[in-house]
Amino acid sequence: MDVEQIDINKEPPTREFLEKHIAADRFLDFVSTRSPVFKERPLPKSKKEAIDLMMKNPNLIRRPIIVKGSMIIFGFDKDQYAKL
């Protein structure tokens, strides 16, 4: 599998990308909830709030983001990687 590495702090995903690929019923699965940011504030309560936070602070996006065709994986997931 060819992998292109992108620094999301320099080239963060667009709002459109996040809107398309983040599931409304599982939006916290896409947020790095262990971030120190959440020691200072509560976790987001909606997909919109989560994306707003991600746009302001790309470090809150679970990494890595793997894109292969129409399959998108946020964060390290060995089972999902095996499907690629």
Image (tube, rainbow, N blue to C red):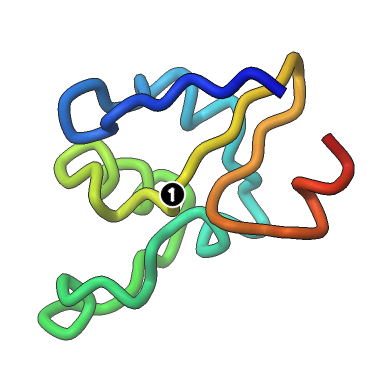
Res 79 quadrant in image: bottom right
**Which residue is located at x 58 percent, y 41 percent?**
22
Q: At 66% across and 32% down in the image, what residue appears? A: 72
Quarter placement of the N terminus: top right
Label 1 amino acid? Arg
Residue 60: give x, y in percent of width and height: 29, 55
On the rendered image, what quadrant is the C terminus found in? top right
Please give the name of the residue rendered at 57% of the width and 61% of the height, measured from the top-left corner.
29
Disc 1 element: loop
Q: On the rendered structure, is 39 left or right of 14?
A: left
Which residue: 51% across, 54% down?
Answer: 30
> Label 1: few (<14), some or many (≥20) within 10 Å?
some
| Residue located farthest toward the right when viewing the structure as drawn | 83
> Where residue 17 sits in the image (x, y, percent)?
48, 22
Residue 52, placed above or below residue 37: above
> Residue 74 location in percent, x, y?
56, 46
Per the image, the residue denoted by label 1 is 63
